[in-house]
Amino acid sequence: MTRLLKSSFGLVLAIGMGVAVGRSARAELPKAESVKAVPLFTVPSYCEGVVFDKEGRGYVSWGKSITRFTVDGENKVWAETGAPNGHKILADGTHLVCDASQHAVLHLSADGKMLPHASKECAGKPLRGPNDLTLDAANGGFYFTDPGESGKEKPIGTVHYVDKAGKTHLVDDGYAFSNGIVLTPDGKTLYVAESQYNRVWAYDVTGPGQVKNKRLLVDLPKKDESTGQIDNQPDGMCLDQAGNLYVAHYGMRQVQVVSPEGKIVARYPGGNLTTSNVAFGGPEHNQLFVTGAIGDEANKGGVFRLDLGVSGLKILPK
């Protein structure tokens, strides 16, 4: 049964959400040649931050705006925040949105109105540019990445945790662009994508916002320019019920599936060349929705659907 906790900064999070991950739950993944990237709709510019609410409606971030859509492709602008990116929806129907222009993790009402920020500083220092986030429902908090202006020459990207009291903590730093982030539903493993080194890290979680044993989960494939790929940076990520990690691989027109052991077990077409984020949705929650831009970021943003027939991890309570 789902139990709700209300934190001091007004967020309602669910305990008991998600599905237990186990080896026995592993479903056979479809072969790449049987999977097509079906175009759903486009927006005027590069898009990311795809997420679904408990009514099955999707949301994508692009430009200054967040667009809400149906799985049939009907869509309209839902909110304007400045530079929205990663996005999660809470049990009470309110939204958390990373926004680099506001240097904050925003908190929006169910109808897209601005509420007091969920996070805007850590240890007295303002955030630089929050990128993506993952809920820690069992403890009433969430993790987020803040790459700021980081890169190989300036590895200042960070990972943070916001506890149920609304306080922001530093979890780790030294990243060359910390990006996608996922917490497993048992709360024991945290995955973080490091974009400019084309890899994903794993941590053991010992308590809310507490981690140890940082280890390399996977070095991802490099671009093949002969096929039109232009880059190789992991971006947004999500999980299926079997614990496989789906990585939007920016610049490669691909989504790569990584097992909990760190093996690449499948590669699927992403539709967009600059593939940016992924989330499971659809009536049976077995379709993967992919964002990005048709070409580079100067092109229109596309939302594509992959009919995988694989059960995605549900991140919302019933």
Image (cartoon, rainbow, N blue to C red):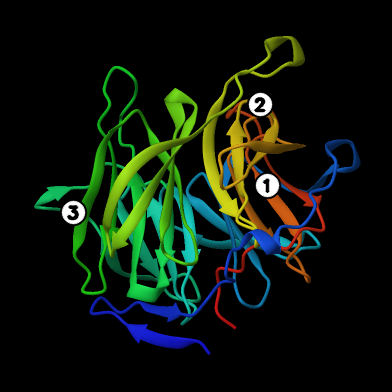
Q: Secondary structure at mark 1?
A: strand
Label 1 belongs to which residue?
290
Q: Amino acid at mark 2?
A: Met
Q: Residue at 33% x, 37% y: name it.
A: 147
Label 2 belongs to which residue?
252
Q: Amino acid at mark 3?
A: Glu
Q: Residue at 36% x, 52% y: name it.
A: 204
Neighbours of disc 2 within 10 Å: few (<14), some (14-19), many (20+)? many
Q: Is residue 48 left or right of residue 113?
A: right
Tell me: residue 297, above or below residue 89. above
Examine the image and state in which quarter residue 279 appears: bottom right
> Which mark, residue 121?
3
| Tag 2 and tag 1, C-beta contact below 8 Å | no
> Marks 2 and 3, Cα distance to the nearest angstrom?
34 Å
Tell me: residue 62, above or below residue 224. below
Neighbours of disc 3 within 10 Å: few (<14), some (14-19), many (20+)? some
x, y percent for residue 189: 43, 55
Q: Amino acid at mark 1?
A: Val
Q: Which circle's residue, 1 or 3, is located before the other in the chain?
A: 3
Q: Residue at 35% x, 63% y: name it.
A: 142
Examine the image and state in which quarter residue 256 appears: top right
